[in-house]
Image: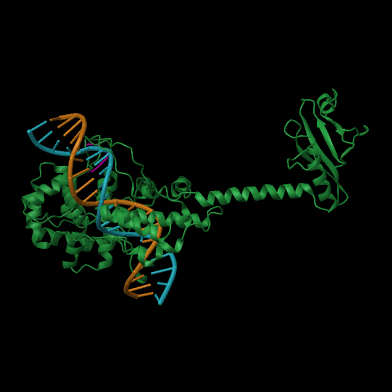
Chain colours: A green, B orange, C cyan
Amino acid sequence: MEVVMSTKANVNLTIPRIEKFKCEPGKAQAFLWDAEVKGLGVRATPSGSKAFIFQSRVNGSCCRVVIGDVKAWRLDVPAGCGEPSARKEARRLQTLCDQGIDPREQKAAKKQEAEQRKIAAMRESVTVGELWPRYMVSNPTWRPRTIEAMEKAALAPGLTRQRGGKPRTPGALYALFDVPLRELDAAKLEEWLQQESAIRPAAARLAFRFLRGFASWCEEQDDTKGLVDILAFGMNRVRKHVAKAKVRHDCLQREMLAAWFKAIRQCPNVTASAFLQTLLLTGARKEEIARLRWEHISFEWRYIHIVQDKTSEDGRFVPLPPYLCALLQSLPRINGFVFASKQSSTGRIRDARARMQEAIQMAGLPHVTIHGLRRSFSVLADWTECPAGVTRQIQGHAAVGASEINYKPRPLDMLRLWHDRIEKFILTEAGIQQPEAGTAAPGLRVVA
DNA sequence: CGCACTATAGATAGGAGAGA
DNA sequence: TCTCTCCTATCTATAGTGCG
């Protein structure tokens, strides 16, 4: 684009002249050029703003640069004075142009430099807590449960419990929120882990994993790359402060079955009683059973359809052995849930631990958790010499080993054969009168 | 193939609160 | 009063993955 030069004769710029100078009505802009310094001028616009500009040619093309507002810049300063002025600036720009340097490029370069300095300053000081919110929204594949756990790890102090009014304890990660990313090194991690592991080892372990994920993410971001000492997370001196996960082994052994069944069958809460027995007799996960609906059970074909979770997946089909079949059939139909509760907001059983403990106590047994019932199923199944793969499939474990990973799911009939045996074994050990071994359901092959 | 490790999902424990 | 829910803190289990 060609720059139109002013037709007006150059005048000696003075402060009064600049003040009087105005953009004529109807014109977009007006120029007043200095006679003393070549290229220096004042540009007025209809709105009344006036700025010193510099206009010249560099490498054959026009070049106009805004020096600044006339109110901000002085026209001239006495010789030898260090202060900046419009005339000085224009002379400087002219020398650049004479050298073939485009002042606009120089300006852009300076601007970029300033931005880089700003980023550098940010990098110097940005803290874990400042970046954490960005990290939290960075991965849309995280499930709600994961996000909840991460939020809890990052929980700030000052909140009150919804029940009881006590203060909530801050998350294990929160202690690091003030730490600049640059200072998140092995020593810092060690110090933090030592403190947190002493109070709540498992929570600290979880928080450490979240932090590690966060650190990898920081490495992937352009503006935070290279700030975290990512190797520190793998160092032995750090990792030795991460507590090992403990493994639970509590389980009902065969010789405990009689006492446990006797106690649990006396439980006045028939729903809780049936729920706990179902857990033992299917080896399923607590929540899988708790969310069972009547339409998931076929008494005709004797199977239970265990739905994966609310998301999708069609889950798995497990057999419904005779005793369990009769037990579930006897339950009252209160709502859509097999293990219904009138009090629960979800409409289904929430927590059967109290009944479990009661039974354990009544039976004089050692402590067994509800998840222990799931463990018990596979231990008890071993007594029937049921193939491990069958037990895993009934329980919904992942397939193990190459032969099973590419496996063809066993037909429900085969599972039923074993499942009936397992149930029979458990009930015999428990000394329970068993229902007539009625007609087995016709072969229903389900390719799940 | 087996193991170790990470990421994700879910369970246990304790206790306050509320309804029958 | 009893029994169950449900909130919170804490811990464990399982799937997925990479490596020797």
In magenta stretch: residue A296: no
Q: Is residue A150 above or below residue A256?
A: above
- Of the 4 image quadrants, the one containing the N terminus of chain A is top right
- Of the 4 image quadrants, the one containing the C terminus of chain A is bottom left
Side of A75 where A111 appears, left or right: left
Q: Is residue A234 at least partly visible in the picture?
A: yes
x then y, percent, for residue A217: 48, 55
Residue A30 lies in what quarter of the image?
A: top right
Residue A255 lies in what quarter of the image?
A: bottom left
In magenta stretch: residue A336: yes
Q: Main secondary structure of the magenta part?
A: loop
Give the tally of numbered discs. Answer: 0
Side of A29 where A399 appears, left or right: left
Front-most of residues A82 and A26: A82
| The magenta segment | A334-338
x then y, percent, for residue A6: 90, 34
x then y, percent, for residue A61: 86, 48
Q: Is residue A443 at least partly visible in the picture?
A: no
Front-most of residues A381 and A184: A184
Q: Is residue A362 above or below residue A337?
A: below
x then y, percent, for residue A343: 21, 34
Side of A171 where A8 appears, left or right: right
Side of A157 where A78 appears, left or right: right
Q: Is residue A23 above or below residue A357?
A: above
